[in-house]
Amino acid sequence: MPLMNAPVTYHVTPSHPGAHIFTVTVTLARPAAEQVFTLPTWIPGSYMIREFSQHIVQIAGADAAGPVAVKKLDKRAWSVTGARGPLTLTYEVYAWDLSVRKAHLDQTHGFFNGTSLFLSPEGFADQPHAVTLHPPADPKCVGWKVATTLPRISGGPHDFGDFLAADYDELIDHPVELGTFEVAGFEVAGVPHEIAVTGVHSGDLGILAADSQAICAVFAELFGGLPMERYLFQLTVETSGYGGLEHRASTALIHPRAGMPRAGQTSRSDDYIGLLGLISHEYFHLWNVKRIKPEAFLPYDLSAEGYTTQLWAFEGFTSYFDDLGLLRAGVIDAEKYLTLLGRSATRVYTASGRLKQSVADSSFDAWVKLYRADENASNAMISYYTKGALVALALDLTLRQRSEGRVCLDDVMRALWERHGRPGVGVPEDGVEKIAAELLGEDLTEFFDLAVRGTTDLPMAEILAGFGVGFRLRPMESASDRGGKASGKSAEVLRGQGHLGIKTRSAEGGSRITAVLDGGAAQDAGLSAEDVVIAVDGLRCDGKLIEICAERAPGETVSLHLFRRGVLMTFTVTLGSPPDEVVYLELLEDADEAALARRRAWIGV
Ligand code: ZN
């Protein structure tokens, strides 16, 4: 359709990069008598009300006869009454959020999600939306290009120009990167893929593309082909940011630049494996949540929270398959895979909130808990990502063992794709459970009651033993211990370290407490988050509070000097003993032949 004939047309200009301002116009050829425009309050994939209208700075309207009044109706809606002929709203959007969820603009690059920029005219959501992207006039922005999967109708690859989305839902599902990014391309199952990298780095895009290609091919094979005609990874590398957001034909990623692969590298660093895990995760979402969706998301209501108890399946299963995809692609070996699984499980077992909140409740409450995690989070809640991944592991192994290798979690994903994803039918709240039980041919109510609706630990040791893998718990060795590996020290030695039960970060010559854990010595003594501990037994602690106490024995008392809200206070703490909460997995030497066969089928060793 020619652009001017689209019912809704937008123009986007990075008009003032120095001030982080995009200027946007939206034009309606035939507005309603009272035409309402709205902006989403949240972006699909990130379950928190963000009120994107907060960043609209100025808004003005005009029709064929001249300026018209634009009335604000509520936090996210505006209206124009009695406009004649084409109605255009012109507005500025402040873009200074370097995350995958909003918009960002300066003289080095621009990025935006449609949810931040595109006002939606009510009554037109199902109709085509056209967009013209204009280059910035700022002389510092020379050579800027465009990376987006918005369907293009003018200009060559990476040119500014005209784009057309079939409806508003599609319009906001193709974020746009502007700037001087580097590009690497590859094909998977005949479908062109690109990685566009923004930011200063010295990584090797060829290595990144080759490893990404291998990972994508694993999932293309799992699902029997790809559900889109092209794919784009929009990767921004910077000092410490981290995040990913899935879209129907692209993903926006932010990762520390230390995760980029080095030319000539002989092995893959932990940081790089982290980046590949993020890439794997978002790519798996192409199916799981972008197309296989909870009923509650069909369609999305972007004016308010969308409630589902199923994020443990959509995020947890994806978190399980992301690292499994790295193993299947051959970019990590089984030993590394078990380390990653152990680290992920450690994040569950170090959170006592797992004994209070189920993953079903965690999913439902994502809007007010996981996305608004506070200093009490590990005492009060569990992540549907990490525990969801553990549920996926337990389910995968349970299906494999009970079916004697006939059924695994891959089959559940394929059935979800065939019955829900491909035909666009939402997954009911009990849909995943029913498909798993049906494929196995056995009732799984007890499993799901425990794993999804329960708050007691899954029998992981028992489940993994059936696959010749030992599930081990030990005390934390140091504050930087992420688990996944045995300690060089014996459990007995570790249990002899004095324990406070806190998390800290270094601050002002002392240690700022960021969390006080349930049942620990610090909680008993009345220490609180935000306390800045400056001395232990009269000696400055220099950010080493946890380490200093670990050199004492459980049962010893220490005197702590700290500032709380600017007031110097003294606390006497009787140190506790560290709990067994760090997970690592190891291959069992004495596993029987049946267990070894299951292990080979699962992870190839
Ligand atoms: Zn995810």
Image (cartoon, helix red, strand yellow):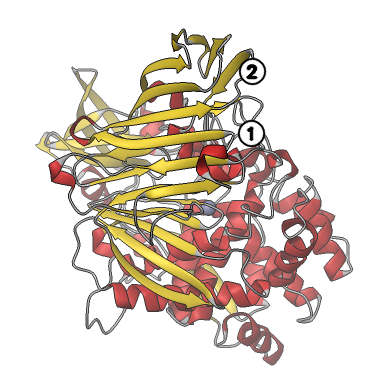
Q: Judge: label 1 CB < 8 Å from ligand 1.
A: no
Residue 509: give x, y in percent of width and height.
11, 36
Q: Dot 1: within a 10 Å radius of its alpha carbon, few (fewer than 14), some, or many (20 or more) residues? A: some
Provide the residue designation for mark 2.
32
Looking at the rendered structure, the kind of residue marked 2 is Ala
Name the quarter where the C terminus is drawn.
bottom right
Q: Is residue 462 above or below residue 529?
A: below
Give residue 52's quadrant in the image: top left
Q: Nearer the viewer, residue 135 or 283?
A: 135
Give residue 360's quadrant in the image: top right
| Residue at 17% from the left image edge and 39% from the top image edge | 138
Give residue 267's quadrant in the image: bottom left
Residue 263: give x, y in percent of width and height.
22, 79
Among the two numbered marks 2 and 1 on one chain, the one whose residue lies closer to the N terminus: 2
Looking at the rendered structure, the kind of residue marked 1 is Ala
Is residue 390 in view? yes
Q: Are marks 2 and 1 in contact (CB under 8 Å)?
A: no
Q: Is residue 190 left or right of residue 466?
A: left
| Residue at 63% from the left image edge and 80% from the top image edge | 602
Q: Dot 2: within a 10 Å radius of its alpha carbon, few (fewer than 14), some, or many (20 or more) residues? A: some
SS category of the residue bearing label 1: loop
Residue 87: give x, y in percent of width and height.
51, 20
Provide the residue designation for mark 1.
125
Is residue 345 in view? no
